[in-house]
Image (spheres, rainbow, N blue to C red):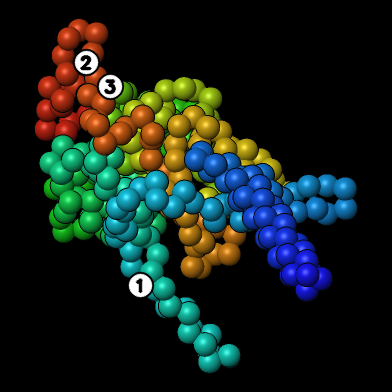
């Protein structure tokens, strides 16, 4: 009887220990992420009495939110170190596009905006082959090398800015996204994919777009390379990212840049576009569809 009592007691203690471990696991798991992609526990670390944001926040993605995505574009790069006899190789320039129903760019009529090229046209060329009209913007290129399949690619020597100006401090012509959409007659139709790869300027642009309330209207997907250039501004970077996700964008992809430890490739889709059907192209106040106003892609000057 005494041996049975000890056995039952041991079994009970083991059960209670397992149950306690399971409860702790559930609490921490549910506290780490939610459907919107927000972090609580694992995003922060303590330095003295201060709480700072960790890079794990930018590595997180909502796995399973996009069932099928594909990386378009990219080129192989090699970076050799003769002193250490090491060679670093990898692909850069590719962007993840969600191809789920309602989110996949419809071939033949899809519209892609691409800001930042560095004369790597691999993504733009791939999306043109897919069947999209690609509008590429980069004011830093003096002699852009257009790809062979450039019939669907429209290049503008203009940069993405927070105001419209013919010359900023760098001597570049800059225009807001809302102004570009207006002058390209895209204010009333969805932008299927928005690529932003502008080497650190993305945070000011993102803040401006979130404030103006027009730029991101009816943008289905966003791909942005983010740069964490200042460790003391990680809270600022995180808060802007969280504001974008709180506005209805779901982060379905993330990856650290192969060549820069403080840069991350992130991609989101707009939750307002579901598999039940795409939002229709909007109609102007005069009753005309914007597609009817696009003739031979001859647009007025943006600034």
Assign a secondary structure to mark 3. loop
Q: Label 1: how many residues lie within 10 Å, few (<14), some (14-19) or many (20+)?
A: few
Sequence-earlier tag: 3 or 2? 3
Task: Tell me the quarter of the picture where residue 241 sits.
Answer: top right
Residue at position x 26%, y 48% from top? 99
> Is any part of residue 208 visible from this angle?
yes
Q: Label 3: how many residues lie within 10 Å, few (<14), some (14-19) or many (20+)?
A: some
Pointers 3 and 2 in contact (CB under 8 A)? yes
**Left or right of residue 44: residue 281:** left
Kindly give the residue lying farthest to the top in the view shown.
286
The foreground one among 23 and 11 is 11
Assign a secondary structure to mark 2. loop
Which residue is label 1 attached to?
A: 76
What count of labels does the image hold?
3
Which residue is label 2 attached to?
A: 283
Kindly give the residue lying farthest to the front in the view shown.
1
- In three-dimensional space, the C-alpha distance between marks 3 and 2, rounded to whole angstroms, equals 7 Å
Assign a secondary structure to mark 1. strand
The residue mark sitting in front, 2 or 1, is 2
Sequence-earlier tag: 2 or 1? 1
Kindly give the residue lying farthest to the right in the view shown.
48
Counting from the top left corner in percent of width and height, residue 264 is at 52, 56
Counting from the top left corner in percent of width and height, residue 17 is at 73, 60
């Amino acid at each position: 009887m005494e041996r049975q009592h000890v056995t039952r007691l041991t079994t009970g203690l083991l059960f209670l220990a397992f149950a306690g471990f399971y409860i702790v696991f559930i609490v921490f798991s549910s506290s780490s992420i939610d459907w919107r992609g927000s972090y609580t526990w694992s995003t922060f670390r303590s330095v003295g009495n201060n709480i700072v944001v960790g890079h794990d926040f930018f590595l997180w993605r909502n796995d399973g939110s996009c069932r099928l995505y594909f990386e378009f574009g990219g080129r192989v790069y090699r970076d050799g170190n003769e002193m250490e006899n090491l060679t670093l190789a990898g692909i850069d320039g590719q962007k993840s596009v969600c191809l789920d129903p309602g989110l996949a760019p419809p071939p033949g009529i899809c519209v892609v905006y691409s800001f930042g090229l560095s004369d790597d046209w691999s993504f733009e060329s791939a999306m043109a082959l897919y069947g999209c009209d690609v509008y590429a913007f980069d004011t830093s290129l003096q002699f852009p090398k257009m790809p062979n399949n450039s019939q669907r690619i429209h290049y503008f020597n203009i940069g993405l800015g927070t105001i419209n100006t013919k010359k900023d401090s760098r001597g570049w012509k800059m225009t807001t996204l809302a102004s570009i959409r207006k002058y390209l007659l895209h204010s009333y139709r969805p932008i299927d994919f928005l690529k932003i790869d502008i080497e650190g300027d993305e945070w000011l642009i993102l803040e401006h777009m979130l404030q103006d309330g027009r730029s991101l209207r009816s943008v289905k997907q966003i791909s942005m390379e983010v740069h964490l250039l200042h460790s003391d501004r990680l809270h600022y970077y995180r808060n802007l990212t969280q504001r974008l996700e709180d506005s209805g964008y779901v982060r379905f992809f993330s990856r650290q840049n192969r060549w820069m430890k403080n840069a991350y490739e992130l991609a989101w889709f707009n939750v307002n576009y579901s598999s039940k059907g795409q939002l229709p192209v909007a109609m102007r106040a005069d009753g005309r569809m914007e597609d009817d106003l696009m003739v031979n892609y001859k647009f007025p000057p943006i600034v």
